[in-house]
Image (cartoon, rainbow, N blue to C red):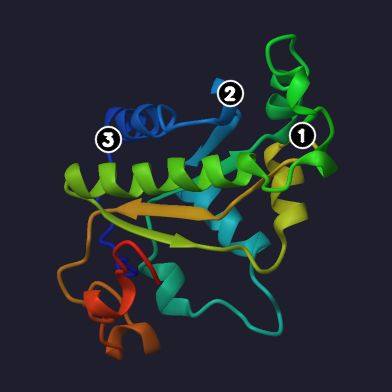
Protein backbone atom coordinates (compact mmCIF):
# COMPACT_ATOMS: atom_id res chain seq x y z
CA UNK A 1 0.00 0.00 0.00
CA UNK A 2 1.29 3.42 -1.01
CA UNK A 3 0.46 6.44 1.13
CA UNK A 4 2.58 9.11 -0.57
CA UNK A 5 1.65 10.06 -4.11
CA UNK A 6 3.05 12.67 -6.43
CA UNK A 7 0.67 15.20 -8.01
CA UNK A 8 0.74 13.88 -11.59
CA UNK A 9 -2.83 13.30 -12.77
CA UNK A 10 -3.82 9.81 -13.87
CA UNK A 11 -5.34 9.67 -17.35
CA UNK A 12 -9.08 8.90 -17.25
CA UNK A 13 -8.63 5.99 -19.67
CA UNK A 14 -6.29 4.29 -17.18
CA UNK A 15 -8.89 4.63 -14.43
CA UNK A 16 -11.63 3.43 -16.78
CA UNK A 17 -9.53 0.36 -17.62
CA UNK A 18 -8.97 -0.39 -13.91
CA UNK A 19 -12.68 -0.05 -13.13
CA UNK A 20 -13.56 -2.14 -16.19
CA UNK A 21 -11.36 -4.96 -14.90
CA UNK A 22 -12.73 -4.59 -11.35
CA UNK A 23 -16.35 -4.78 -12.50
CA UNK A 24 -15.56 -8.15 -14.10
CA UNK A 25 -14.79 -9.72 -10.72
CA UNK A 26 -17.15 -12.52 -9.68
CA UNK A 27 -20.57 -11.63 -8.30
CA UNK A 28 -23.05 -14.04 -6.72
CA UNK A 29 -25.63 -15.11 -9.29
CA UNK A 30 -23.96 -12.71 -11.74
CA UNK A 31 -25.83 -9.98 -9.85
CA UNK A 32 -23.26 -7.37 -10.90
CA UNK A 33 -24.14 -5.30 -7.85
CA UNK A 34 -20.88 -3.43 -7.41
CA UNK A 35 -20.89 0.24 -8.37
CA UNK A 36 -17.89 2.58 -8.51
CA UNK A 37 -17.80 6.29 -7.69
CA UNK A 38 -14.58 7.84 -9.02
CA UNK A 39 -13.31 11.12 -7.59
CA UNK A 40 -10.59 12.49 -9.85
CA UNK A 41 -10.61 16.25 -9.53
CA UNK A 42 -8.73 18.32 -6.97
CA UNK A 43 -12.07 19.71 -5.77
CA UNK A 44 -13.84 16.36 -5.35
CA UNK A 45 -10.89 14.84 -3.50
CA UNK A 46 -10.63 17.91 -1.23
CA UNK A 47 -14.33 17.49 -0.44
CA UNK A 48 -13.76 13.80 0.30
CA UNK A 49 -11.02 14.66 2.83
CA UNK A 50 -13.09 17.49 4.36
CA UNK A 51 -16.22 15.37 4.84
CA UNK A 52 -14.33 12.38 6.27
CA UNK A 53 -12.14 14.38 8.63
CA UNK A 54 -12.91 13.37 12.22
CA UNK A 55 -12.43 16.40 14.48
CA UNK A 56 -11.21 14.12 17.30
CA UNK A 57 -8.72 12.27 15.08
CA UNK A 58 -7.98 14.71 12.27
CA UNK A 59 -6.34 13.59 9.05
CA UNK A 60 -2.60 14.06 9.03
CA UNK A 61 -1.77 17.08 6.84
CA UNK A 62 0.92 15.07 5.01
CA UNK A 63 -1.59 12.29 4.35
CA UNK A 64 -3.92 14.76 2.62
CA UNK A 65 -1.26 16.85 0.86
CA UNK A 66 0.47 13.75 -0.51
CA UNK A 67 -2.66 11.62 -0.78
CA UNK A 68 -3.98 9.87 -3.86
CA UNK A 69 -4.94 11.85 -6.93
CA UNK A 70 -7.82 9.46 -7.61
CA UNK A 71 -10.24 8.06 -5.04
CA UNK A 72 -12.60 5.23 -5.93
CA UNK A 73 -15.48 4.16 -3.73
CA UNK A 74 -16.48 0.55 -4.45
CA UNK A 75 -20.17 0.48 -3.51
CA UNK A 76 -21.83 -2.79 -2.56
CA UNK A 77 -25.41 -2.56 -3.85
CA UNK A 78 -27.35 -5.23 -1.99
CA UNK A 79 -30.49 -4.31 -3.94
CA UNK A 80 -29.07 -5.98 -7.06
CA UNK A 81 -28.48 -9.20 -5.14
CA UNK A 82 -31.92 -9.24 -3.53
CA UNK A 83 -33.52 -8.62 -6.92
CA UNK A 84 -31.42 -11.28 -8.63
CA UNK A 85 -32.21 -13.88 -5.97
CA UNK A 86 -35.91 -13.08 -6.34
CA UNK A 87 -35.83 -14.20 -9.98
CA UNK A 88 -37.31 -17.61 -10.89
CA UNK A 89 -33.97 -19.42 -11.29
CA UNK A 90 -32.69 -18.25 -7.87
CA UNK A 91 -35.77 -17.81 -5.67
CA UNK A 92 -35.58 -21.40 -4.36
CA UNK A 93 -32.42 -20.46 -2.44
CA UNK A 94 -34.55 -18.33 -0.10
CA UNK A 95 -32.33 -15.26 -0.34
CA UNK A 96 -34.97 -12.71 -1.25
CA UNK A 97 -34.44 -10.76 2.00
CA UNK A 98 -31.21 -9.33 3.41
CA UNK A 99 -31.45 -11.16 6.73
CA UNK A 100 -31.61 -14.54 4.95
CA UNK A 101 -28.04 -14.21 3.66
CA UNK A 102 -25.64 -15.92 6.10
CA UNK A 103 -22.79 -14.15 4.30
CA UNK A 104 -23.47 -10.79 2.64
CA UNK A 105 -22.02 -11.56 -0.78
CA UNK A 106 -22.51 -7.99 -1.95
CA UNK A 107 -19.77 -6.96 0.49
CA UNK A 108 -17.54 -9.89 -0.46
CA UNK A 109 -18.01 -9.22 -4.17
CA UNK A 110 -17.21 -5.51 -3.71
CA UNK A 111 -14.09 -6.52 -1.78
CA UNK A 112 -13.03 -8.84 -4.62
CA UNK A 113 -13.62 -6.04 -7.12
CA UNK A 114 -11.48 -3.78 -4.91
CA UNK A 115 -8.63 -6.29 -4.90
CA UNK A 116 -8.87 -6.58 -8.67
CA UNK A 117 -8.67 -2.79 -8.94
CA UNK A 118 -5.64 -2.67 -6.64
CA UNK A 119 -3.82 -5.29 -8.70
CA UNK A 120 -4.80 -3.63 -11.99
CA UNK A 121 -3.48 -0.32 -10.67
CA UNK A 122 -0.09 -1.86 -9.89
CA UNK A 123 -0.03 -3.41 -13.37
CA UNK A 124 -0.72 0.07 -14.78
CA UNK A 125 2.29 1.48 -12.93
CA UNK A 126 0.28 3.20 -10.20
CA UNK A 127 0.52 3.12 -6.45
CA UNK A 128 -2.57 2.02 -4.59
CA UNK A 129 -3.96 2.29 -1.08
CA UNK A 130 -7.06 0.63 0.39
CA UNK A 131 -8.48 2.21 3.52
CA UNK A 132 -11.75 2.70 5.35
CA UNK A 133 -13.99 5.61 6.18
CA UNK A 134 -14.26 5.96 9.94
CA UNK A 135 -16.03 9.31 10.03
CA UNK A 136 -18.45 11.23 7.82
CA UNK A 137 -19.52 8.37 5.57
CA UNK A 138 -23.21 9.32 5.58
CA UNK A 139 -22.43 12.95 4.74
CA UNK A 140 -20.07 11.90 1.96
CA UNK A 141 -22.56 9.50 0.41
CA UNK A 142 -25.33 12.10 0.58
CA UNK A 143 -23.03 14.68 -1.03
CA UNK A 144 -22.22 12.22 -3.83
CA UNK A 145 -25.87 11.30 -4.37
CA UNK A 146 -25.41 7.63 -3.46
CA UNK A 147 -28.84 6.05 -2.84
CA UNK A 148 -29.74 5.33 0.77
CA UNK A 149 -29.11 1.84 2.10
CA UNK A 150 -25.97 1.09 0.10
CA UNK A 151 -22.43 1.88 1.06
CA UNK A 152 -18.78 1.43 0.12
CA UNK A 153 -16.71 -1.44 1.48
CA UNK A 154 -13.75 0.92 1.69
CA UNK A 155 -11.80 3.42 -0.33
CA UNK A 156 -9.29 2.80 -3.11
CA UNK A 157 -6.71 5.56 -3.43
CA UNK A 158 -4.69 5.62 -6.65
CA UNK A 159 -1.96 7.72 -8.16
CA UNK A 160 1.68 7.74 -9.09
CA UNK A 161 3.89 6.81 -6.18
CA UNK A 162 5.96 9.66 -4.75
CA UNK A 163 9.68 9.14 -5.22
CA UNK A 164 10.56 10.49 -1.78
CA UNK A 165 8.86 8.00 0.50
CA UNK A 166 8.40 4.36 1.37
CA UNK A 167 5.45 2.37 0.08
CA UNK A 168 3.81 2.60 3.47
CA UNK A 169 4.46 3.85 6.95
CA UNK A 170 3.24 3.26 10.46
CA UNK A 171 3.25 0.11 12.55
CA UNK A 172 2.57 -2.21 9.62
CA UNK A 173 5.73 -0.98 7.90
CA UNK A 174 7.94 -2.27 10.73
CA UNK A 175 6.23 -5.64 11.03
CA UNK A 176 7.54 -8.74 9.30
CA UNK A 177 5.36 -10.91 7.14
CA UNK A 178 4.47 -14.19 8.79
CA UNK A 179 6.22 -17.19 7.24
CA UNK A 180 4.20 -19.16 4.72
CA UNK A 181 4.54 -22.26 6.90
CA UNK A 182 2.60 -20.46 9.65
CA UNK A 183 -0.37 -19.84 7.38
CA UNK A 184 -0.47 -22.76 4.96
CA UNK A 185 -1.97 -26.10 5.90
CA UNK A 186 -2.28 -29.03 3.53
CA UNK A 187 -5.04 -31.57 3.85
CA UNK A 188 -5.70 -30.78 7.52
CA UNK A 189 -5.22 -28.01 10.11
Disc 2 designates what residue?
29
User: For numbered disc 1, what is the local secondary structure?
Assistant: loop
Q: Which is more N-terminal, label 1 or label 2?
A: 2
User: For numbered disc 2, what is the local secondary structure?
Assistant: helix
Q: Is residue 19 left or right of residue 59?
A: left
Front one among 24 and 168: 24
| Within-10-Å neighbours for mark 1: few <14, some 14–19, many 20+ | few
Which residue is the extreme one toward the front? 187
Answer whether residue 85 is visible to the viewer in this image.
Answer: yes
Vertical side of 114 occupied by 47: above or below: below
Front one among 145 and 176: 176
Q: Which is more N-terminal, label 1 or label 3?
A: 3
Report if the CB atoms under discs 3 and 1 are less than 8 Å apart. no
Vertical side of 14 occupied by 9: above or below: below
Answer whether residue 41 is visible to the viewer in this image.
Answer: no
| Within-10-Å neighbours for mark 2: few <14, some 14–19, many 20+ | few
Judged by depth in the image, the label closer to the viewer, 2 or 3, is 2
Determine the CA span between mark 2 and mark 3: 33 Å
Q: Which numbered circle lies on residue 11?
A: 3
Judged by depth in the image, the label closer to the viewer, 2 or 1, is 2
Q: Is residue 27 left or right of residue 12?
A: right
Q: Residue at x 24, y 51 (%)?
A: 8
Disc 1 designates what residue?
147
**Quarter of the image where one finds residue 177:** bottom left
Determine the CA span between mark 3 and mark 1: 28 Å
Amino acid sequence: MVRRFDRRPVAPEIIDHIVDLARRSPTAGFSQGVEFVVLDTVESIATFWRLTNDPKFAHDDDEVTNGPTVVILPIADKRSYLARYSEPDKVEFGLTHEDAWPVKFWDIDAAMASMTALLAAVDAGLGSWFFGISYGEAELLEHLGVPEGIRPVGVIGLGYRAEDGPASRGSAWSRSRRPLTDQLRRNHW
